[in-house]
Amino acid sequence: MSTITNSIFTSATAARFDHLVTLYPVKRSALIPMLLYAQDEVGYVSDAVVTEIAQRLDLLELDVRNVLSYYSMLRTKPAGKYNVQVCTNISCMLRGGYEILDHCKHKLGIGHKEVTEDGTFSLEEVECIGACCWAPAMQVNYDFHDNLTTVKVDEIIETYRAGQGKDVK
Amino acid sequence: MPDVKFTVDGKQLTAPAGTLLIDACKAAGIEIPAFCYYPGLSLQAACRMCVVRQEKVPKLQTACTTTVAEGQVFTTESPEIAQARKATIQLLLGNHPLDCPVCDAGGECELQDMTFKYGAADSFYAEPKNHREEQKWSPVVYFDRPRCILCYRCVRMCGEGMDVFALGIQNRGSSAVIAPNIPAQQSPDHLAHLDCEQCGMCIDACPVGALTSGAYRYKTRPWEMNHVATVCTHCGDGCKTTLGVRSTSDGAEIVRGDNRDKSGINGDFLCNKGRYAFDFANSPERITSPLVRQADASLKEVSWEEAFHHTGKKLRELRDAKGGKSIGVIGGNRLTNEEAYLLQKFARTVLGTNNIDHHRTADYVTFAQALSGQKGRTASLRDTQSYPAVLIVGGDPTNQAPGTAWNLRTDVRLNKARLYVANTEEIKLRRQAKAFLQLAPYGYGALAAYLAGDAASASSAATDSNALNSFRDAVKAEENLLILIGSELRGADLKRLIEFGLTIPSAKFALLSDYVNSRGAADMGLLPDMLPGYVPVTNPGPYAEQNAPTTPGLDMLQIFEAASRGELSALYVVNSNPTSRYNIDPAALKDTFVVVHEMFMTETAQLADVILPAANLYEKAGSVTNSYGDLQLVQKAGDRAGVRTDFEMIVRVADKMGADIKSLVPFGKSTPGVRAAGTLGDMGQSRGAQAGEADRHAVWLTANNLEPKLSPFDPFAILDEIQRLVPGYNLLRLQLISGNDQHLEPNALSFRSAAEESASRSRRDLVLPSGDTLFTSGTLGRFSPALNEVQRYQANEPLIQIHTAAE
Amino acid sequence: MPTLVSHPDEVKVISRRFGQGAADIDKYLELDGYKAVQNAIDQGENMATWIIDTMKASGLRGRGGAGFPTGMKWSFVPKQSAKPKYVLVNGDESEPGTCKDHVIFLHDPHSVIEGTMIAGLAIGAKMGFIYLRGEYRYLLKIVEKAVAEAYAKGFLGKNIFGSGLDFDIVTQTGAGAYEVGEESALMESLEGKRGVPRIKPPFPAVVGLYGGPTVINNAETIASAPHILLMGGEAYAKIGSERNGGTRLFGISGHVERPGVYELPMGYNLKKAIYDVAGGIKDGKKLKAVVPGGSSCPVLLPEEIDVGLDFDQMGKAGTMLGSGGIVVLDETVSIVEFALRTISFYQHESCGWCIPCREGTDWIKKTLTRVYNGGGAKKDVANVQYLAENMLGRTFCPLGDAAAMPTLGFVKKFRKEFEDYIEGQKAGTPIITVEQLVGAH
C-alpha cells in the first residue's frame, strides 16, 4: 500500500500510517494525527518526519511545515522522555497552578520548554488542558494528573524517574 | 447573472447579482480600502479594512466577501467605519517599523496611503516594536518581516497565480509569519531561502515594503523615477512593462522593471526576466563607440561620421563591383517592426539583395499561409485569459512564454477553462490540464496527422492509444477552442494541425516563438523569399513600386555557405549573433566585409569590420508584434551615451551609400510639384493628405493633439508605409500611440500560382528554437547580472520540489 | 482520574450512566444503549423527520457555547446533495473552565457514537467524525475502543440495524489549538490544514467538510440526542427553562468547596449552583467575581449572580452561558492578574489570520503585562478598553470577541482596581525600563 520504501518509522507505525490515509475521503486529513504519532515515536517532528509525511500525503514539505507550526503540541525540537505540562490557565491558576509550575521548575531545575540534562524530563507551561474541575492539573506526556499538591507532584515525578510512571501513547 | 440594483452611499448602483461589493463599488468609482483583497485571488477577509455597514445587519461586513443582491443598502464611509479602519491601522502600526523614509515602498505603500487617509498617527504603545533582521530569500527577493502586515497576497500569488507554492504561513497568532520553502536548517548557509521561479510576483503584490526586489531595493525613491510604459524585450509574449528610469551622467539608467498599470496583455503578470533582466542595458560591457577594423586587424574607436562613411563607401563599392547578390543581411528578433521593415527595404532597394534572413524561432510563413483567406482565426494573448477551452500542442509556456502560462492558469482558475496539453515532455502546465497527452518522441507530426483523421499515425503519436483517442474526442468536442502551437510544429505538420483546427467552428490559433519581435521579423519580411506580410518576392504586388529583386535570395545557412565559398562580399548583421547560434566557422567570413550593429562584443561582433554600437529595445521607440500578432508601442526609457538606434544607423548608412532617403523613409514635407526620385507615387493624397507620408503622419498627430516629429530617424515616418503596404498591418494609430495592444492578422495572400504553392511546400525548415529558459534570454541574458546571479543561485540551491500537491 | 461529584439538585439525563462502566458496550446496552437509534430506524420512511421534529421539540440548544437550536441546524442540511454529507462531532473542548466533554468521553463514549449516528440518520450522512482535542489522547483511546465495539456488534458499518443504511465513524485528535473549536476551523483541521476558520457564508450545513453538507455539533449536544429520542422531545424540554430545553453539564471550578461537573436543569440559579451545589466559596472566603461560561464570558460581580443559567437569562445579565464552565473567584484574586492570564490565553491561541485579533490580543497582553509588572500608567486602562472595543465585532471569527468581551468586563467592572494597582505599584516600583522589556522578548 505504502509507496514509501525506506520508512523512518517502525513497521507498526508505518502500517498505522498506511491505514490512516485510507480512513478519510481525502488523504491529507491524516496529516495531523500522523504528525502526532510520528512525534510520539521520534520524540519530535524532525526534518525526516516532515519529508516522509509529505511523501505519504503527496504534500509539499512547506505545506507540512505550515500546518505543524500551527499546532502547539507539535514540536520541532526534542523534548524530554517525560514532558511535564503544567496548566496555569484560570481554573488551575486559582487553585495553585503557578505554585505547581514553580515547584516543577525548582524540582527539575529547568524552565519553560527546557529539557533536563539527562533528557528524562522537560517542562512546559501549557494552556487549559480540560481538567478545570480537578485543578490544579498537569499532563505527563498524555497522562493526566489532577488535584495536585507539591507533595503529589514530587511523587509523580519520582515515579516517572523510576520508570514506573504511566505513559500511554 | 441578472443585474440587481442596490444602494451604496445613497447612490443607486447596478451590477450582476453575486458581484463582490468591493468590485461593484470600484466599478462605480467608490474605492473601498483593502489589504488582503486582490482581484482574481481567493478571498481572505483577513485585514478587515473593507468593512462597510449593511442596512439591517448587526455587524460591519467585509465588502470583499459580500455579494450584491437586489435592494441591499450599504454605507462605505461613516465615522463608525472610519474608526474601525483607523483602529486596524493603529494595530498594524504598533509593530510596523516606521522606516518609511528608507523603505522601498515609501510613496507606493498602501499602508502609508491608508494611514494618511484615516489618520492613525497616535500610538498608545510603550512597548518596543518586535525587530527582526531582513532576510535575503533569493538574489531577487528580500523579506523584511516587521513590515509584513500578513495580507497573504504573496502566498496566494505564488500558489494560486504561479502554481509554485513556494511561500507559506507558519506559526500562529502574533508569531504568524510568511515562510519560504527552504527552511534555514536545510539551507547550506542556515538562512531560509526560496526555491521558485523567481518571478517577483510576491513583491509586486505586496502592499507594503515587506517583500522587496533585489534589483531595486534601496536604489531610489519612486518619485525620483520617470515611469515609461513599454514592452518587455525578452520572450515572444511581449508583456507590457513599466520601466523606472533615473537620470545618470551618461544618459538614463533603468532602475526598475514592474507592471504598474496592469492594463496590458499580461494582466497582472511579469516574470523574472521582465522584472529584473533590464540590467543588460546598464552593463559596463556595452559597446559605446563605433569600431572599425584596421589594417593590423585591430578594432579602433572612430567617430560616428567616420564609421558611417567607411561603411557606406565600402558597401557601395562592393554592391557596385560584385552585385547585390553578393551581400547578405541578417536581422535580429529584437528590432522594432519599423527597423525590421526598414532593414529589409534597405537590403532590397539599396543593397539590391534578397539575401535576408533572421534567426527563426517559429515557422510563421507556414502559419500565415495555412490561415490564408481566414478572418478572425488568430488568437490574441488576451484570448488566453478568457477562452473556454485551450489546446497546447508542443512548447512549454511556463519556461518559454511565462505570460502565456500565467494567463492560461488564470483562465483555468477563474473561468474553469478546459486545458488540453499534448507534449513529448511533462510540462508544468499539465497540472492545470483537463487532459494531458504524453506524446511519443517527435510525435507532433503524427499527432497532427492523427487529429486530422489519419488513424495510422496513432502509434507514432503516442504509446497510449486510449489516451490519444479520448484526447482527440475531447478536443474535437470543443466549439470555442484556442489552439496554441509550439515551434516544434513546422511546415507540413503545422499546416495539417491548422487544417484540423479549422474544422472546429470557433477555433483560433497562435504559434509561439521565442523573442519579443520574432513575429515582427517574419511579418516584416526579414526572409529571403517573402516581402513584408508574406508576399512572395517573386510576385511583389503592392511592393512593385520598390523595384526589389524578384528572385528569392539566400537563407541564413546559404548566406554562410556562400561566405565559405568566398562568394559573400559583405554581410550586414543587425543585432543578431548568427555565428554563435549556427556554429559558423569564423574563417568562413575572412573575405567578407562584415558590418554589425551590436550592444556587446558577441562572437559575431568579434568578426566584424565595422561595429556600430546599438541601442536596445528599452532605448528606442517603435512597435513590436508578439507571437500572437498583438501589436504594441515601444517607448524609449533608458538612454546610453554613445549608442544609436538601428533605425537611425540604417538610414545613415543608406545615406552614405548615396541612397535617396526620402524614398527609403518617406518623411517631411515634399516641395510641391517636385517629387524626390524614388519617392512613392502615393504621397498620401489618395487618402486625403497633402504631402509625404511622414507629413501625413504629422497631420494625423496634430489632429490628435500629439507632437509631430519630422525626421528620417523617426520610426513613425515609416509606420505609415507599413500600414499602407503590409497586408494585415491595417492598424489603428490612436490605439498604438495610447499604449493599447491591438491584434493584427497578417495572414498570407492566397497562392496566386502553382509555382507559389509548390515553393511553399519546398521551403526549408530553418526553425531553431532559442532554448531559453526562465533564467536565460539569448545574448541579453548573458549580459544581465541579475539573470546570471539567479542562474547561479538556482543551480546551487538543492531544487527540492517545484511541484504541487494533488488536492 | 477526574472525580465524580453529585448533588441532589442534579437532574441526571446525560450523566445518568456516568460511573457505571458504560464505556463498555455491554453495560451501555444494558442501560438502554443504542435503543434510541433503533427507535429512529423503526420510524421507517419518517425517520429523518421524526428525529428532527423530536430534536426541535426538545428545545436543545448547542452546548458548545453559541446555543443554536440543534433541531433547526439539522433541518438546514439539504435533502439532496451531489457531495456526501457528514456529521462532525466537536470534542475539541478548549475553553478555559470547561471540562464537561472530558467526562462524557470518559464515562459514556457510546452516547457520543449513538448521537453521531442519529445526526447522520437525520441528515442522510454516511460518515461521521469525532474530533477530540489533542490533549485528550487517553480519551481518544476510550472512544476508539467504543467505536471498535460498535463495529464488532454490527452497529456501525454496512446496513446498520438492518436498515439498509451504512454509517462509519472515524475518530481522531487535534494537536493543540483552541481555535479549532470554531466549527469551520475544525473542518480545516480535519482536512489536514492550519486551523484557520473559513469565510461564511457558505455555512457548513451547505458547504462543509470536503465541500459536502455537514452538521457540526458539540460532543455534549450530540450525546444528548439519544436521551432526547428516548424520553421524547417535550419531556426533555420540560426539564429546562423557556426556550432552553433540558439539562446541561456545568463545570464549576475555581474557589468553591466542591468543584466538579454537575448536570443541572437549564435555567438553574447561578448563585445556588455556586453556594449549594458546589458547596460555596472555598475556605469561607468572600466571593469576588464569577466568570460564568468559560473564560470568554464577561465577568459577573457577586451582586449579579442571582440569575438563571440559560442562554437568554445570561444574555440579559450582560454575559453569556457559553460552554457552561463556571469559574469562581474569591476575594484574594487580583483581577489585574486574572485579566492578564485570560488575555494571554487568547493571545496564545489567536490563529493570527485577521489583524484586529492577532494584533489586538497581543497589544492587550503586552500592555497588561507591563501593568502587572508595575510599569503601568493610568491611560493604559483606557487603552486596553479602546483596543478591546475596537476588536469587538470586527474580527474574522468569534475568537476576537472571546478575547475582547472578558477584557471589557474586567476593565469596566474593576476599573478602580486597575487604577489602584497602577497607582499603588508606582509608589514603590520603578517604571519598567526599555532594556527590561527588550530582554523580555
Image (tube, coloured by chain):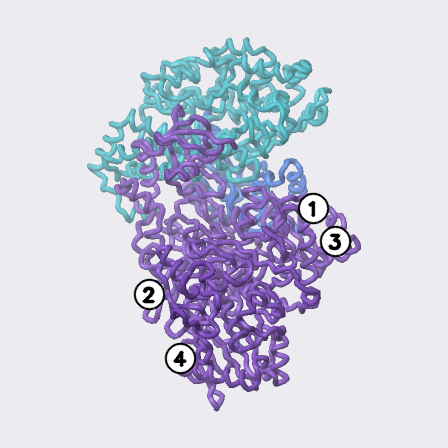
Chain colours: A blue, B purple, C cyan
Q: Mark 4 falls on what kind of element? A: helix
Closer-to-camera residue (A116/B493): B493
Within 10 angstroms of label 3, few (less than 14), some, or many (20 or more) residues? many
Closer-to-camera residue (B425/A98): B425
Q: Name the residue under label 3.
A: B450
What percent of the width, then of the height, locates residue B379?
A: 57, 52
Q: What separation in Å lies between label 4 and label 3 (alpha carbons)?
A: 58 Å
| Amino acid bearing label 3 | Tyr
Quarter of the image for residue B494 reads bottom right
Please check whether the numbered discs 4 and 3 fall on a single chain. Answer: yes
| Amino acid bearing label 4 | Trp
Q: Mark 2 points at which residue?
A: B247
**Which disc, if any, is residue B476?**
1
Please check whether the numbered discs 1 and 4 fall on a single chain. Answer: yes
Q: What separation in Å lies between label 3 and label 1 (alpha carbons)?
A: 12 Å
What percent of the width, then of the height, locates residue C92?
A: 52, 30
Q: What separation in Å lies between label 1 and label 4 (alpha carbons)?
A: 59 Å
Q: Mark 4 points at which residue?
A: B304
Using the image, name the chain to which the residue with label 4 belongs.
B
Q: Is label 2 in contact with label 4 (beta carbons under 8 Å)?
A: no
Q: Give me the residue at 30% from left, 42% from top.
A: B117
Within 10 angstroms of label 4, few (less than 14), some, or many (20 or more) residues? some
Q: Give me the residue at 53% from left, 19% from top.
A: C72
Q: Up-down: is B10 above or below B450?
A: above
N-terminal label among 1 and 4: 4
N-terminal label among 4 and 3: 4
Using the image, name the chain to which the residue with label 3 belongs.
B
Left of C125 or right of it: where is C178? left
| Amino acid bearing label 1 | Lys
